[in-house]
Amino acid sequence: MSVTLTGGAGTSSAAQANKVLRIGLGSLPDQLDPAAAADDSTVTVLKCLFEGLVRLNASGQAVPAIAKSWTLSKDGRTYTFALRGDAKWSNGQQVLASDFEYAWKRALAPEAKNVYAFNMYMINNAQNYNEGLLKDTSKIGVKALNNTTLQVTLKEKTSYFIQLLAESIYFPVYAKTAKANNQWATDLKSMVTNGPFKLKTWKSNEISIVKNPAYYAAQEIKLPEVRLLLPENPTVAYMNKEVDWVGGGGVESVDYTSLDSASYRDLHEGSYASTYFYQFNLTKPPFDNLKIRQALAMAIDREALRYGNPAFGFVPPSIHGTQLNFRTEMSDKMYFHEDVAAAKQLLKEGMREAGLTKFPSFTIIVNEYINHDVIASKVIKDWQKNLGIEASVEIQSFEELLDNRIHQKYAIARAGWSADFNDPASMLELFSSQNVSNDTGWSSTVYDRYMQQARQAADPGTRMQIYATAEQLLMDQMAVIPLFYTVTDYLSHPNIKNVYVDYDGSIAFTRGSWR
């Protein structure tokens, strides 16, 4: 388990005196189009330059932003949003409902090939348009009724739609500029934004943003300037007091080999909405047997893996529930436990049911990346020691791994899933029978019914209970073996507050400040 350490030494007097926050990143965006965002660094910048109808607060809850209020029709399909009259673009022009209509239809355009366009598919006719089956954009369920009223019609009731609206693909764009200049998202001079910050400079190794005085809640923004830097080694740059904050991205962004003891005190752990797991080939013996799958899941020492936080469910703790995170609201429920004695008994019973006198050796396939093979080797060692099972690891390219999973050419395969938006639906919908990303081979009509019920549920508490029941079914069937919830470590100057790693690995600093 990663350890959270607080406190710390180190000062950044120059930055504090000037109230400039310097963040060291591992990469910088090459374009700033909200519809095309597909990596953590781009999302980090976009979330401070743009703002949608809602935004996520520090608890992960959607709160009003450009939309000051909204109503929902009795059938749960039509939202009517009232936009703030004081919402301005950085050029002083009013943010209009038509800017949202234009931006959303632009994001769905088939020729744009935006990877997260599917997050808009609950809008009526959005999928048909994105897939080229519909040409008439007036039939898409988004319409500006006037300058400050936006109407959105869904194809069916979708209870988590408001939560989705905080994602960058739902941000508005300044229609006049976007229509006139198709290179606007890479051009500093053409960039018109509506968020709490605006661009000052944009270089290959630095993006500097300053407080946007036209922002409707400018009084809430305490940082007058933030510099996003690209040092050769962000950890070394932190130790040299060249940056004040390093981390994010859902990977090992802190270089522990370079970290000194003084900076180690500034190390913190941030949650990342991602679950690392193994999936079985359920179409062939021996993993078509439930007891065998359960035995393998219960015979792994997750703490000894030394990656992330041990997972005994599928929804990670950074995912929001009703008021708190989903895991906390479900009382941190563990759907199974590590129990070697019970695992041995289950394996014995499963082998008997499968007609096996000796367990066949098998291979875990993993892709080429940081430590996937190391993790698999540790898991195999546990199975050998605890169950007497023999297995090996095969490293493949990521493309080969995906192809083998899709075509069920494996025994056990490495997998992982990260939330596209901050809601349990983004994790649990993966296992719906119709989900194109479900390459596990597992499906359940009962599970599908739970997902449909959750989408239709008006009461948030009821919806979370349905998701908990669905997760229970998923774990009872041991369709996959969850290993750990991903975390990301970061270094933060002790005088910085309200700057943190968001659920998606981006860095949230819009409401940050110096103590």
Image: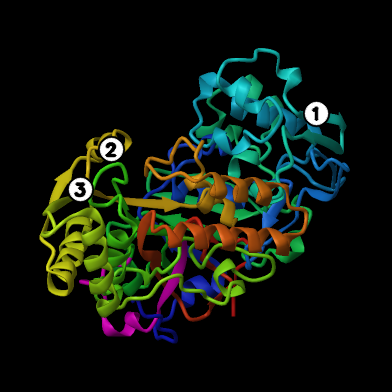
Position above or below: 340 against 477: below
Q: Amino acid at mark 2?
A: Gln
Which region shows up in magenta?
254-272
> Residue reaching furthest top?
135
* Residue depicted at 43% across the width and 80% down the height: 11
* Residue depicted at 20% across the width and 40% down the height: 397
Whole-angstrom CA distance, mark 1 to mark 3, is 47 Å
Q: Earlier in the sequence, mark 2 or mark 3?
A: 3
Nearer to us in this view, 377 or 336: 336
Q: Residues within 10 Å of mark 2 (few under 14, many from 20)?
A: some
The circle drawn on residue 408 is: 2
Is residue 265 shown in magenta?
A: yes
* Residue depicted at 27% across the width and 52% down the height: 287
Question: Residue 388 lies in what quarter of the image?
Answer: bottom left
Q: Which residue is mark 1?
A: 143
Q: Earlier in the sequence, mark 1 or mark 3?
A: 1
Q: Could you say where residue 435 lies in the image, as x and y percent from the top left?
A: 50, 38
Is residue 295 shown in magenta?
A: no
Whole-angstrom CA distance, mark 2 to mark 1, is 43 Å
Nearer to us in this view, 268 or 195: 268
The circle drawn on residue 365 is: 3
Q: Amino acid at mark 3?
A: Ile
* Residue depicted at 52% across the width and 65% down the height: 318
Nearer to us in this view, 46 or 112: 112
Q: Amino acid at mark 1?
A: Lys
The quadrant of the picture occupied by the N terminus is bottom left
Q: Residues within 10 Å of mark 1 (few under 14, many from 20)?
A: some
Position above or below: 80 against 62: above
